[in-house]
Image: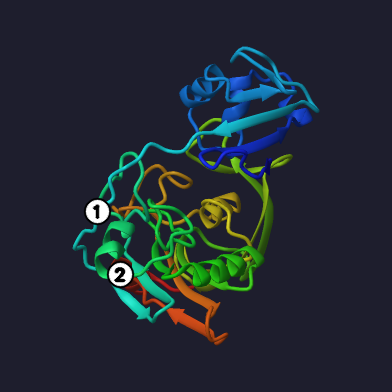
């Protein structure tokens, strides 16, 4: 997939080249296989509204794609969602004129979307922080990167456009460092892993990501086992790339999903958790104004501390 410069400010334009593995797919199915985060219904709507072309010609949803074909897609902007400041408590760990570093709790969505129109981190920062960058638009003021709803930990906010551009470049070039702590299922046979795969949207479930043998985006994660317990472990995950659900997908890929992850792990939530036991514990960036290298550390949330104490009491290998 190759994002193009927008022909119109209101649309995002993409070009896809059909791979041999995608040969013979119906157009609507093909679109759902791409990283556009759209449903089959939305794909059909794009086709009906003539926002999809196949080799520069309009198509129907039943048209088939073939290896080497070019598919162009125009994505219209999302429907407007009212965005209001909300007096939601925030754990602001650091703040100056350029950045703010927040320890996001598990269960909080980062920015509004359909189904989560209020109670988000953006609603909270609009109340607590007055100056925010506008690069990501009205729905995502100051947001440089994201965490899953049920992943807790550090997220950095840009308070002006200069800071935003600097931080975005650091995330793009991987000059920042992000370390996560996770509780993972099973007994690890070794202490250190370097997992490098392609990750793409799951062809069977568009809400999920999956390791792909032939297409997708390159993803690299280093995993170090810090403590091994009877049937779980505390692991540190160092991201070298930043793909959607990367740590959860990679841990599941090696047979050790996050404890509490009913999407990529065991369907039975044996500890009754709200979601995956995954915490963005450390973030290192270069300050956009001063050039100082800064490291921020967020303590484990209470529920993870309590689980750790339980595992340690049961048995440590």
Give the quadrant of the N terminus.
top right
Residue visible at 37% across and 79% down? Answer: 95
Between 310 and 133, the residue placed more toward the observer is: 133
Residue visible at 39% across and 81% down? Answer: 96
Give the side of residue 189 with respect to residue 41, left or right.
right
Circle 1 crowding by C-alpha within 10 Å: few under 14, some 14–19, many from 20: some
**Which corner quadrant of the image does residue 214 belong to?**
top right
Is residue 179 visible to the viewer in this orientation of the structure? no
**Which corner quadrant of the image does residue 224 belong to?**
bottom right
Q: Which mark is residue 99?
A: none
Residue assigned mark 1: 84
Give the side of residue 188 with respect to residue 113, left or right.
right
Q: Which mark is residue 130?
A: 2
Between 256 and 65, the residue placed more toward the observer is: 65
Between 30 and 160, the residue placed more toward the observer is: 160
Circle 2 crowding by C-alpha within 10 Å: few under 14, some 14–19, many from 20: few
Residue farthest toward the front in the current orientation of the protein:
8
Helix, strand, or loop for circle 2? Answer: loop
Give the side of residue 182 with respect to residue 193, left or right.
left
Q: Position of residue 30 (x, y in %)?
A: 63, 26
For marks 1 and 2, the one nearer the N-term is 1
Measured along the vertical axis of the image, is residue 77 above or below residue 242?
above
Between 153 and 90, the residue placed more toward the observer is: 90
Q: Position of residue 85 (x, y in %)?
A: 24, 58
């Amino acid at each position: 997939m190759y994002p193009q410069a927008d022909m119109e400010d209101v649309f995002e334009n993409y070009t896809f080249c059909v791979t041999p593995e995608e040969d013979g797919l119906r157009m609507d199915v093909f679109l759902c296989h791409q990283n556009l985060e759209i449903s089959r219904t939305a794909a059909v709507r794009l086709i009906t509204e003539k926002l999809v072309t196949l080799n520069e010609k309009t198509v129907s949803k039943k048209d088939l794609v073939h290896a080497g074909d070019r598919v162009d897609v125009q994505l219209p902007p999302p429907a407007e969602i009212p965005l209001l400041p909300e007096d939601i408590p925030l754990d602001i760990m650091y703040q100056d004129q350029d950045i703010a570093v927040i320890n996001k709790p598990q269960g909080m969505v980062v920015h509004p979307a359909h189904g989560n129109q209020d109670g988000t981190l953006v609603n909270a920062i609009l109340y607590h922080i007055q100056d925010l960058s506008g690069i990501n638009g009205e729905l995502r003021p100051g947001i440089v990167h994201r965490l899953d709803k049920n992943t807790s930990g550090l997220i950095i906010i840009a308070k002006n456009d200069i800071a935003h551009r600097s931080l975005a470049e650091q995330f793009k070039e991987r000059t920042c460092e992000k370390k996560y702590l996770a509780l993972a299922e099973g007994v690890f046979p070794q202490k250190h892993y370097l997992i490098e795969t392609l990750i793409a949207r799951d062809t069977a479930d568009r809400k999920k990501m999956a390791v792909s043998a032939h297409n997708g985006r390159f993803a690299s994660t280093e995993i170090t086992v810090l403590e091994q317990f009877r049937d779980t472990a505390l692991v540190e995950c160092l991201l070298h790339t930043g793909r959607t659900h990367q740590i959860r997908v990679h841990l599941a890929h090696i047979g050790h999903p996050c404890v509490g992850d009913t999407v990529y792990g065991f369907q039975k939530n044996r500890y009754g958790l709200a979601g995956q036991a995954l915490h963005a514990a450390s973030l290192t960036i270069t300050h956009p104004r001063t050039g100082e290298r800064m490291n921020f550390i967020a303590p484990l949330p209470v529920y993870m501390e309590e689980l750790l104490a339980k595992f340690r009491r049961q048995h440590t290998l």
